[in-house]
Amino acid sequence: MPGQAAELVFDEATKRYPGREGAAVDHLSLTVPAGEICVLVGPSGGGKTTALRLVNRLIELTSGDIRIDGTSVKAQNLVQLRRGIGYVIQQVGLFPHMTIEANIGTVPRLYGRPRSWIKTRSAELLELVGLDPSYAKRYPAQLSGGERQRVGLARALAGNPPLMLMDEPFGAIDPIVRTRLQDEFLRLQREVRKTVVFVTHDIDEAIKIGDRLAVIRTGGRLAQYDTPRAILEKPADDFVAEFIGPDRALKALSLHTLAELELGPPADGPTCGLEMTVRDALALLLEKKATVLAVTDEKGAVIGSITREELLA
Amino acid sequence: MKTFVDAFRFMADNPHLLLEKTGEHLELSGAALGIALVLALPLGLWLGHLHRGLFLAAGVSNVGRALPSLVLIAFGLTIFGVGFWNNTAALVVLAIPPILTNAYFAIDTCDRDVVDAARGMGMTGMQVLLRVELPLGLPFVLAGIRVASIFVIATATIAAVAGGGGLGQIIVNQASYGLSGVVAASLCVSVLAFAAAGILTLVRRTASPSHESLT
Ligand SMILES: Nc1ncnc2c1ncn2[C@@H]1O[C@H](COP(=O)(O)OP(=O)(O)OP(=O)(O)O)[C@@H](O)[C@H]1O
Ligand SMILES: [Mg+2]
């Protein structure tokens, strides 16, 4: 089975659906370096899903090319290509007639892995996505929507693919669970280091998850491709500026954590961890009507403080 | 009431005759159903998998409903001559529509997202069909087979008109067997049809929800 991360290149990739005016994806060119998360954001109907499905050829290119580690997707055997790409579809699509374990084991089974190997792997992956091993014998209908999305993620990871395509994997989930899944996903990504193309139309999720953002406008044209910071600081045009919203200065604050700032001496005040973002720290200050926060380490010991002025600087 | 009592007396008096004719009836129905399955099931499943040939699946079922079996037998008489194969051919034509149509729609209407996920993970067309679409569509496929088997068993009775064997020989020959014989044979046909339907319902229960696990 495949291993390490792969570089993904869209080269003037274009898709026109027959009988439809205009392109769904229009001369899209961008490079996702190996091991990075590229988030496609844009309005509904903008061509994000189409762009993803061009990669595993569930939809065929009209013109242009897409290359994985230098090899064109067009030059590869369809079945081999897809087995090497983890795909989390927008609607999850678990197999209702198979147990969770069998669902997760789908790709390893296609590779002819023995049963015992698959069982062990499923258990590992369940743990990785934060589900109890007892879920192995359940059926999809017996899981909540959020749990199913985790299984979808585990299933896509099972073949250890160098490339993952994730189409709104955390859509239709309440904000609290969504935040937790995002955090877990980022932790996971630090462990497994895949090349990921992640689709969402939630700009906050994009900023949080992405190493790079590709902002796509209606008609499948690339409006801007850069790091979240660069896009927040310097939107390429009015469309991008409008899409990321008028509060982009505030959003930019969520790119930094307290760990990156210089702390003052320990002081009294509401406590917060080093990993908290500057934006959340400000929110905490406002909520507690305080002027200074006590910053704690992982063990909860106060190691410093930070004032409102320092946060806003 | 007396008719039924007489019918049961007929059964008690002529067990060998009834058994023999039931055997013939089953043979005829079984052959027809088997051939229809071989012809229609793979075709229906594969067309459903490709989402192609709706006109065929829907058209065949309409034609099938419109053609009275007697006309078919009449046609068959001229083509194959009198006898077993003529009757079988007519019954096959009768059995194909429900099998083909149900197989087609069972697969064609499978949850697109689930099928999409299967393809996206690199299953071949055949793997998608056998591991995902067929298990999910199985209840509907079996329902079609069930309808076909009831049709065939009931209609096989008419075979006697065209010189075939089976329970129909007793039913169309009241002169020799009397009313009690006709009713007894009819009861046998009903029992056969119910038994076939029952067996297929049972298969459907055990097979669905056709759960697949690793162990
Ligand atoms: N199979 C298809 N045939 C024809 N047109 C299609 C097909 N699939 C998508 N489209 C059209 O292509 C455009 C892009 O669709 P796509 O699904 O890629 O958008 P999206 O960015 O993923 O939207 P969303 O955020 O709502 O999921 C839309 O206008 C859509 O109607
Ligand atoms: Mg989409």
Image (cartoon, coloured by chain):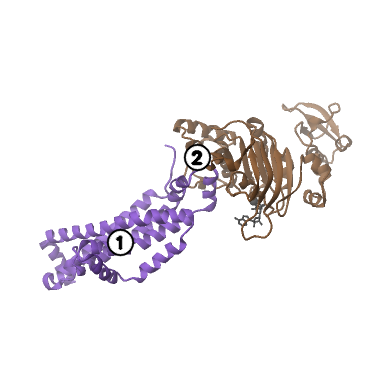
The amino acid type of the residue labelled 1 equals: Val
The percent position of residue A284, horizontal first and vertical second, equals 79, 40
- Asked whether mark 2 lies closer than 8 Å to ligand 2, one says no
The percent position of residue B206, horizontal first and vertical second, equals 37, 49
Q: Residue at image x 60%, y 41%? A: A73
In the rendered view, does B172 fall on the left or right side of A21?
left
Image depth: mark 1 or mark 2 in front: 1
Give residue A263's quadrant in the image. Answer: top right
**Numbered-mark total:** 2
Q: Is residue B1 visible?
A: yes
In the rendered view, does B188 fall on the left or right side of A214?
left
Q: Is residue B3 above or below residue A245?
A: below
In the picture as drawn, the residue positioned furthest to the bottom comes out as B175
Front-lying residue, A61 or A247? A61
Q: Residue at image x 61%, y 58%? A: A18
Q: Is residue A168 visible?
A: no
Where disc 1 sits, the SS reads helix
Front-lying residue, A126 or B118? B118
Mark 2 burial class by Cα count in 10 Å: few <14, some 14-19, many 20+: many
**Which disc is residue A106 wearing?**
2
Task: Check the picture and name the quadrant holding the N terminus of chain B.
Answer: bottom left
Give residue B166's quadrant in the image. Answer: bottom left
Q: Chain of mark 1?
A: B
Where disc 2 sits, the SS reads helix
Q: Chain of mark 2?
A: A
**Which residue is labeled 1 in the image?**
B92
- Which chain is brown in the picture? A
**Which disc is residue B150 wearing?**
none
Front-lying residue, A50 or A298? A50
Task: Check the picture and name the quadrant holding the C terminus of chain B.
Answer: top left
Determine the colour of chain B: purple
The amino acid type of the residue labelled 2 equals: Thr
